[in-house]
Image (cartoon, rainbow, N blue to C red):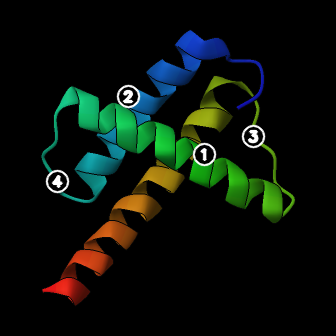
Amino acid sequence: MHGVGIIGFIIIGILAGWIAERVMKRNHGLITNLAVGVAGALLGGFIAGAIGMGASGLIGSLIVATLGAILLLFLVSMIRRRSL
């Protein structure tokens, strides 16, 4: 997430977490959405970089962060299922 700054990173994290929450049919609070969104942004950015894709600007960063957050929620749900 190049060029968005720390405030932009937080806003993108909250939005990405909220969108991922809706897509995955979850119900979290603002802080959880921020945590999931920021972790998703890091995960999505890592994966995008590993496959040679880059994201720049607000929209590109939001897309990568949202996809990473969705993947993160999916992985957490798979781990929880296996442990039950």
Residue 37 lies in what quarter of the image? top left
Residue 3 lies in what quarter of the image? top right
Q: Report the disc number at residue 14.
A: 2
Tell me, yes or no, whether the two marked residues, 2 and 4, touch with CB atoms within 8 Å. Answer: no
Q: Residue at x 38, y 44 (%)?
A: 36
Q: Does dot 1 land on a helix, a strand or a loop?
A: helix
Residue ID for mark 3: 55
Tell me, yes or no, whether the two marked residues, 1 and 4, touch with CB atoms within 8 Å. Answer: no
Label 2 or label 3, whichever comes before in sequence order: 2
Q: Report the disc number at residue 12.
A: none
Which residue lies most toward the front here? 83
Label 4 or label 3, whichever comes before in sequence order: 4
Amino acid type at image mark 2: Ile
Amino acid type at image mark 3: Ala
Q: Residues under labels 2 and 3: Cα distance? A: 18 Å
Q: Report the disc number at residue 42.
A: 1
Tell me, yes or no, whether the two marked residues, 2 and 1, touch with CB atoms within 8 Å. Answer: no
Amino acid type at image mark 1: Leu
